[in-house]
Amino acid sequence: MADDNKDGQELSEDEKLAAEWEAAMDESGDEGSEESPDDEPAQATKKAGDDSGESTASNVRAAPMEEFEEGDLATPGGGTPPDLDVILDIPVSISMEVGNTQIPIRNLLQLNQGSVIELDRLAGEPLDVLVNGTLIAHGEVVMVNEKFGIRLTDVISPGERIKRLQK
């Protein structure tokens, strides 16, 4: 009896599931002895339980695949393109990056008021415009009503922006 308990503990998840299906099938009885395509998955599961984990080539079949046309990918259901108005009011974070650098933690801990950190950009180079951390444009700093602004000088195409934001 201890051996039966040990064997029960060593059953894989698939074997346990197959045993549960077999028990459920036995409880429901043989309602309709005709084989129908809808019963094939249950029969395959029952057969897998009977095989004790061994699978045969007869249990494996290719799933039917639906053919898609090129236009179906861009427009689900082949109808009109997706409505982008749904996402147009979602707020995003825009930031401008002057430059960056890497320094050891030792130097980071020694920084204090008046310290100067050298960046990887030259003075006068365009800034990076980032949306949610993804580069979408370059621009130059301007003053707008006593505040900083940025004039875009090079903008990535809308298609490329969407591709970059999806990453």
Image (cartoon, rainbow, N blue to C red):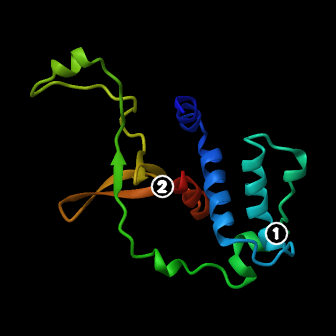
Q: Position of residue 70 (x, y in %)?
A: 82, 69
| In-image side of 149 versus 137 (left or right) | left
Q: Label 1 amino acid?
A: Glu
Secondary structure of the residue carrying tag 2 is strand
Say above or below: 167 vs 4: below
Name the amino acid, label 2: Thr
- Can you name the residue that lies furthest to the left here? 113
Residue holding disc 2: 153
Residue 111: quadrant of the picture: top left
The quarter of the rendered structure image containing the N terminus is top right
Residue 123 drawn above or below residue 69: above
Which residue lies at the image location 76% right of the left edge and 63% below the top edge? Answer: 41
Q: Can residue 155 be seen in this view?
A: no
- The residue beneath circle 1 is 70
Dot 2 and dot 1 residues touching (CB under 8 Å): no
Residue depth check, mark 2 versus mark 1: number of the one nearer the observer: 1
Q: As displayed, is residue 39 above or below residue 59? A: below
Viewer-nearest residue: 121 or 17:
17
Task: Classify residue 120 as left or right of residue 31.
Answer: left
Point 34% across, 52% down: residue = 95
Number of marks: 2
> How far across and down, in percent of the image, does residue 66 sit?
83, 69
